Image (tube, grey):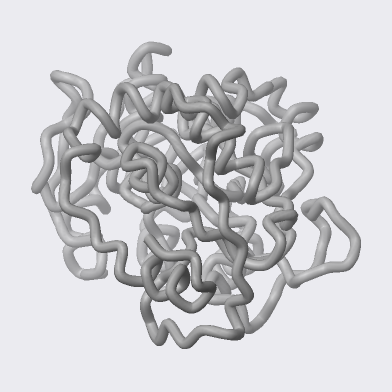
Amino acid sequence: MRILIMGGTRFIGVYLTKILVAQGHEVVLFNRGNRPVPVEGVAQIQGDRTSPEQLKAKLSQEHFDAVFDNNGRELSDTQPLSEIFHNRVQHFVYMSSAGVYLRSDQMPHVEGDPVDPKSRHRGKSETEAYLAQLGLPFTAIRPTYIYGAGNYNDLEGWFFDRIARDRPIPIPANGLHITQMGHVEDLAQAMAQVLGNERAIGQVYNVSGDRYVTFDGLARACAVAAGKSPEKLAIVHYEPKNFDFGKRKAFPLRVQHFFASVDKAMTDLNWQPKHDLISGLKDSFQNDYLATGRDKAEVDFSVDEEILKGLGAGG
C-alpha cells in the first residue's frame, strides 16, 4: 500500500512509520520538515497542515491507499484532509483519544460509552462524528495515556525526575485512583493492524495496555524500572483542593479513575499488547531518560516544594 502519515517524525509517527516500512508499505510523511525522517528513504511532503490551501495544493494530485491522521486535534484540522481524500482512499485512520469519554461510575470505559461534550478533547469526538457522516471508510483509535521512549508528554519522565534524584513523590488524594498506560509501540502495532481489515471500517477502538494501575502503583513501577527499591520510595499524599497551583501542573495524570477496555481491539484487530508496564518503563528509562541525559538536567521542583511545605514534610 501507499500510505500517507500526517506528522510521522515524533513519537507515535516514528513507531508507526518503522512498522509500516518493515511490512513493505510505501510510506509518505506530511509535515513541516523540521525533524529528520525516522526511516532512511521515506518520502516527505513538506507543508503546514493548518492551511487548507497548502493541503489541497500539495496532496490533491497524490494517490494514497490509506491515510493516518495522527495529529488532528480539532475538526477544522481534519476536515480539509478528509474532503481531499473522500472516495479516494481505502482507509482513513484517525487518532482520537479516550479522553473523549464522559466520566462514569461504571468502568472500564467501552467504545459505546457517552462522550463528554465539554471535554478538552471534544474536537476529537466531533471529528469522529464528522468522518462517520461523510461516509469515509474510517477507523478511530482512542488511546489512554501513552508512554515509551520518545514521549514528548511529561508522563513517565515526571516520575523518573523525582526517583532519579531520590526526591519525595507528591501524589494527589490517596494514591488509589486507577489509571492505564499503553506503550507507544503497541499502539502503533494496533494502528497498523487496522489496514485491510474490513471489520475495522466505521469502528472506534480503545487501545492501551491490558492492565490497570493505581497512581501509587505507577510510582512504584517507575522506581523498579529505574533500578530503585519501591519500598524505599517516599510517596507523599496531598489534597489538591488545599493548594492553589494556578496553571502550573502538579501531577501529570487526571485525578480520577481513567481506564478503558481493549477487548474489542484485541478481538477485531487480532492484536495484543506485548509490553508489560515494568518492561516498557525500563525501556523508557534506559533508552530515553538516561540516554538523553535528563537525569542530569535542571528540573523545577517549586510546585513539589510548595506541596511538601504545606504538608510540613520538607524537601
Viewed as shown, does residue 113 lie left or right of 201? right
Residue 266, above or below 279: below
Q: Nearer the viewer, residue 296 or 188?
A: 296
Pinpoint residue 29: horizontal percent, then vertical percent: 24, 39
Pinpoint residue 156: horizontal percent, then vertical percent: 44, 43
Q: Nearer the viewer, residue 261 or 156?
A: 156
Q: In which quarter of the image is residue 54?
A: bottom left
Q: In which quarter of the image is the N terminus?
A: top left
Identify the residue at horizontal 15%, vertical 19% (top origin).
Answer: 40
Q: Residue furthest right?
A: 106
Q: Is residue 111 visible?
A: yes
Pinpoint residue 195: horizontal percent, then vertical percent: 55, 29
Identify the residue at horizontal 40%, vertical 20% (top origin).
Answer: 19
Q: Nearer the viewer, residue 54 or 272?
A: 272
Q: In which quarter of the image is the C terminus?
A: bottom left
Q: Can residue 74 be seen in this view?
A: no
Identify the residue at horizontal 78%, vertical 43% (top origin).
Answer: 261
Viewed as shown, does residue 27 lie left or right of 133? left
Q: Nearer the viewer, residue 177 or 258?
A: 177
Identify the residue at horizontal 41%, vertical 40% (top origin).
Answer: 163
Pinpoint residue 117: horizontal percent, then vertical percent: 66, 81
Residue 112, above or below 126: above
Q: In which quarter of the image is residue 114?
A: bottom right
The number of discs equals 0
